[in-house]
Image (tube, grey):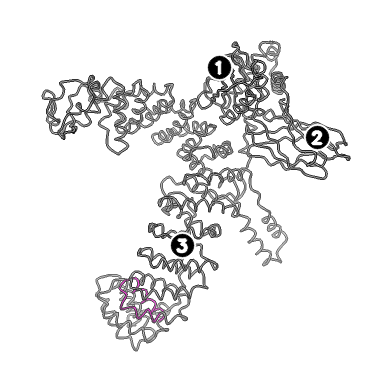
Amino acid sequence: MQRLLQLPASAVNMVKTAQGQEEAKSPVLTPDGSQATWYSAVRPDELRHLRAGNVTEDTGAPAEDGGSTAAQIQPLRHDDLKEMLDSNKESLKLEAMKRIVAMIARGKNASDLFPAVVKNVACKNIEVKKLVYVYLVRYAEEQQDLALLSISTFQRGLKDPNQLIRASALRVLSSIRVTIIIPIMMLAIKEAATDMSPYVRKTAAHAIPKLHSLDPELKEQLIEVIEKLLTDKTTLVAGSAVMAFEGVCPERIDLIHKNYRKLCNLLIDVEEWGQVVIINMLTRYARTQFLNPNVNESTLEEGEEKEFYGSDEEEGKDEKVEKKKKPYVMDPDHRLLLHNTKSLLQSRNAAVVMAVAQLYFHLAPKAEVGVIAKALVRLMRSHSEVQFVVLQNVATMSIKRRGMFEPYLKSFYIRSTDPTQIKVLKLEVLTNLANETNISVILREFQTYIKSMDKDFVAATIQAIGRCATAIGEVRDTCLNGLVQLLSSCDEVVVAESVVVIKKLLQMQPEQHSDIIKHMANLIDNIQVPMARASILWLIGEYCEHVPKIAPDVLRKMAKSFTTEEDIVKLQILNLSAKLYLTNSKQTKLLTQYVLSLAKYDQNYDVRDRARFIRQLIMPTDKSGVLNKYAKKLFLALKPAPVLESPFKDRDHFQLGSLSHLLNAKAGGYQELPNWPEVVPDPSVRNVEVMDAKRKEKKLEKAFYSDSEGESGPTESANSESCTGSRSESSSSSNMESSSGSESEESEGEPESEKEENPKRKTDKSSRVQTTISPTFSSLKTYELLHRITGEGLAVGYCFSRQPFVPDPHMVTVQIQFTNHMDTEARNLRIQEPRLQSGMRIKEFPEIELLPPGEAVTVVMGIDFCDSTQAANFQLCTHTRNFSVSVQPPVGELMAPVFMMENEFKKQQGQLMGMNEIKEALILGDACQSHCVIIQRVTSAANLSQVPCGSDQECRFAGKTVTSGSLVLVTVMTKGDRTAQLTVNCEKMVIGTMLVKDILHALSQ
């Protein structure tokens, strides 16, 4: 606060006197072409707020009584906007702010308007306030002193009822990079992280990296906030929370364990920017927590070699090989990630598709990677910038995964309208995809590309032909003949590049192509490109034994033009003279001495040094050493043929889709892709459902037996949205127990040693309370699980009994009835091979050993549908047959009733407004005119409890989802003309939407 008090007086006066300064008028062109002040362009009713007399009639001149020399030289800018901001009319202020924001969007500097804008931060108009905050976010860092004057206003904005204002205030506060307000920023972020609005929580996540960069010592406190935000179940917050995690503590993988499955399941609904961030983070996470799915391929190859070559080894080593051959079993969480990201390959956003493609490339088994090829080919129809990035990654993938792009070979054919960089990348991909079956088609395409007018593209095509010839020996002669034909081209670039490629190809089989070397020697007079001339000279010198008559004549010609040649050509002339001297000294001795003499006085020191070295090596003197004996071995040694490799060969160690991969260099902030673990990590660290259930039970017990806590209720308004249902149930249960009084007194009188035994009894009591709440008049609908014809005489039906499932309260109770219509008995009735969606669980019923003919038996099983209406698929088995069946619940059966008083209902309903509230108008059916029928229809459609209500026109119902305990509140308000309004408040919007449809259908009949 001392910093605030020590601000310069000029800054304070700048704000206070901005309205009273005498400003110059801005000229505006009138229809007749003359200049007039901007006041003439404003309507008369908008001129009332202006102060007359402060501006002289001369355009652009300041008033005489206040003008300084500097002001007379250059008048103040944006005077019209300042006047509009100082006005009392909110319409003018709004118009001025729109113009200012438009200026910022066009890249113009509006920083001199900061004093006039910051005064309007306390404006009551919401639209003006929003635009002011947009401006302040842009310039708060530049004008820190003036922004600090309004910090109290920003703090008040954090408590504003409008969520956009709260978020904007936090955004501006985090943009003021001054160390003195770090405690204020930290407190604001902590409060915003528990805000009821997901938009504000999202803004808090964005502010965390800013605060961390300002003060890294706050890392531990920020990690606590990040940990809380990562548990948020809202899709709007998920991406921003992961972004904050990546910016502050990417090494804290332990924070992701308990949120891994939630992030995988939310991924499909997160915004596109958040999807990219989450997918990239989960890619690195999976590389540290799961085994390599492709490790068995290399292991099996090693095992086969050991079996073949080491047949006499000990049995212990053979056992090790057998262990390595064990089939790989993918972790269910690994499969969950691949399954939930696969659908995002259909995304319209290229960045999302690219993120999923790199995830599959780095994590998926080889047999499943092919699914990304079609999506990547689709992106190649996009803009050239997107094509460039996609092709960079495809070029890397096609080296190791060639097979998945072969069906789309024609998609990489080059169009004449493609930019040069796109053409070169497509050439790279075509070269990587070349094999014995498609090489003829690819070479035919390359012949067309050589005729292009783009010289760089033609040079790249010739290099691609050389790489194809190197990789596929069957077409090497064909490619050589084609390249030799290009030597007669009129284009110097084509000829030069062909020479360079031919030189590399001839190194593989020089003795079979002496005619080509002779032909190239004849071109030495016509080719002027230094690199091509140097390549021809190297070929003649390297294989001078194959052209013994031509080589000396070439050296003679080169000696004449030695002084005018480029340095690279001079060095090859020296090498040619040395090799000819060692193989044919009679004809070339004098020529060699002449060339060495010329090089001795050359301007380039490399040429001079090479000449001195060669002279001492091949022309011995008394002072020369023993190296002369090894001259032939040094100059005429066999050299290995060059390997023409793709420039993308070693890029896969960078994460695909990253800037580092694009640049082939590590960029700032890049996170290395971890290596696969050798030993599988403990998968139980991601099992958090049981822990959450125990935690909820403890909260339930604590509120159930504590009268004081039950009456006071929760102190935090929005600390954890997921616990709202359990709180309401706990408070209601405590109210019921306190009304009886006997059990609460017993609990208070219990000794310490017996407290550990109480939770089971308490849970059972709470279950009994909920059971009595269930409506007794609701008829249970029976569904067919297995028809008697399909089941060969065994008929199976099921219904939802709406009773608590005792082994696990987070499961829905399903009552199954078996009826044996066969003449023989059915034996060993059981469930096998459940195929469940991610997060779902099943508790099987005990096996029925015997079911006599004509009899029926009823069993109970529990299914955790994970608050979704997706079917639970499993095998229903007898002693002879297996039947595939599925149990699909209506949305109303995913709930449990909750007893709630009217005040508590209104309080909870007030916390579930906005996106969590759905309202629909309906016309009641002929049979739904009475109050009791409406209650019966609603409770039949959903397992809800009626809430006492003082109004005859309203019916209220309350419940919670079985798995997560999320509150579900339903209100039916009837009107006199057979119309009614249905309101559903629910944390889970999908469940709320489906429940509205079911209740509307029930009440409309």
Main SS, magenta residues: helix
Q: Which residue is mark 3?
A: 646
Of pointers 3 and 1, the one earlier in the residue sequence: 3
Residue 68 placement (x, y as % from top left) = 13, 28
414 left or right of 687?
left
Magenta segment boundaries in residue numbering: 517-543
Q: Is residue 389 visible?
A: yes
Residue 670 placement (x, y as % from top left) = 44, 47
Label 3: how many Cα within 10 Å (few below 14, some 14–19, many 20+): some
Label 2: how many Cα within 10 Å (few below 14, some 14–19, many 20+): many
In terms of image quadrants, where is residue 593? bottom left
Residue 353 placement (x, y as % from top left) = 50, 47
Q: Is residue 532 above or below residue 94?
A: below
Distance Cα–Cα, label 2 vs label 3:
66 Å
Q: Quadrant of the N terminus?
A: top left
Distance Cα–Cα, label 1 vs label 2:
45 Å
Q: Quadrant of the C terminus?
A: top right
Name the amino acid type tagged 3. Ser
Name the one closer to the observer, 397 or 206: 397
Q: Secondary structure at mark 2?
A: strand
Is the residue under label 3 in contact with that under label 2 (CB below 8 Å)? no
Q: Which residue is mark 1?
A: 906
Per the rendering, the mark at residue 818 is 2
**Which residue does the image show at 73% across and 24% down from the upper left?**
779
Residue 529 placement (x, y as % from top left) = 31, 71
Of tags 1 and 2, which is closer to the observer?
2
**Which residue does the image show at 35% across and 29% down from the upper left?**
131
Of tags 2 and 3, which is closer to the observer?
2
In terms of image quadrants, where is residue 207? top left
